[in-house]
Amino acid sequence: MRPILPGLTDRERDLEALVAAAAAARARYLCANVVFLMPSAQKKFFPFLEEKFPRLLKQYRKWYARRAYAPEAYRKEISARMHRLRAKYGYDQPLLQQYTTYMSNLVRGDLGVSTRHQDFRVGEVIWPKIKVSSKLGAIALFLTFFLGIPIGELWDLEALASDCAGDGVYEFMLTSAPLNIPGGVGSPPNALAIK
C-alpha cells in the first residue's frame, strides 16, 4: 500500500477496502507509507495534481515545500489508522515474526497465493512449468557448448574487437563461406565477419 496519497487514497473506508481485499486474497504481509516527494518527483506530480485534483495542490505545496515527507502529525494519523486496520484483519504480528514465517514457508517451498491465478498457490502454478523450463535450459546449454564455443573458436574475436574499436563501427554481418577446394571431400567453415 505504497504510497498513500494525502487527500486521494487515505480515507479510512478506502484503506479498509484495500486491506479487506488483501486479506480476502490471502496476502501474507501488509505495509503502508505516506508518499515521499523529492523535488524531482514534485516536478512531475504537481502538474498532475493541478490538472486532476486542483483543490489539493495548495496543501501539497505547503506540506512538501521544505521536506520530502508529509507532516509528522499526518504520518502518525495514517500510522494509527493502518495499525487499527492491521489488527482488525490479522496483520499485526511483529515484523520479525512475519519475516520468520515468510522464510520458513520459503524453505518448505510455499511461495503463497498467486496474484495472477488467485485460486492457486504459486507452487501449483510453477511446478508444472519446471519440466518445460528445464528442457529449454538443457537445450540452451547444449547450444552454448556445441555451437557457441566452436563459433568463438572459428572467428578471431580479438582481431574483430580491435578492428571495431579502431574505426568505431560495431556493426557487421557474421557468415560462413565454404572454401571450394578442388578434390576436397569436405570444406572448412571459413567464418567471415563482413563490415
Image: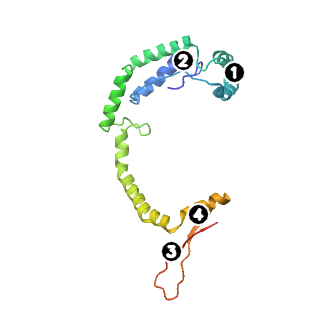
Q: Which residue is mark 1?
A: 54
Q: Quote the CA–CA distance across marks 4 and 1.
A: 59 Å
Q: Quote the CA–CA distance across marks 3 and 4.
A: 17 Å
Q: Which residue is mark 4?
A: 160
| Quadrant of the rendered image containing residue 166 | bottom right
If you read the primary sequence from the N terminus, does the residue marked by circle 3 or circle 2 appear first? 2
Numbered circles on residues, count: 4
Q: Nearer the viewer, mark 3 or mark 2?
A: 3
Asked if the residue at tag 1 contacts the one at tag 3, i.e. Cβ–Cβ closer than 8 Å, the answer is no
Residues packed near mark 3 inside 10 Å, few (<14), some (14 to 19) or many (20 plus)? few
**Res 11 label:** 2
Secondary structure of the residue carrying tag 1 is helix
> Which kind of residue does numbered mark 4 sit on?
Leu
Q: Is residue 70 left or right of residue 21?
A: right
Asked if the residue at tag 2 contacts the one at tag 1, i.e. Cβ–Cβ closer than 8 Å, the answer is no
Relative to 64, residue 103 above or below: below
Name the image quarter holding the C terminus.
Answer: bottom right
Q: Quote the CA–CA distance across marks 1 and 2.
A: 18 Å
> Which kind of residue does numbered mark 1 sit on?
Pro
Secondary structure of the residue carrying tag 3 is loop
Query: In the depicted view, which residue is nearer to us: 73 or 48?
Result: 73
Q: Is residue 158 left or right of residue 110?
A: right
**Res 189 label:** 3
Q: Residue at x 41, y 30 (%)?
A: 25
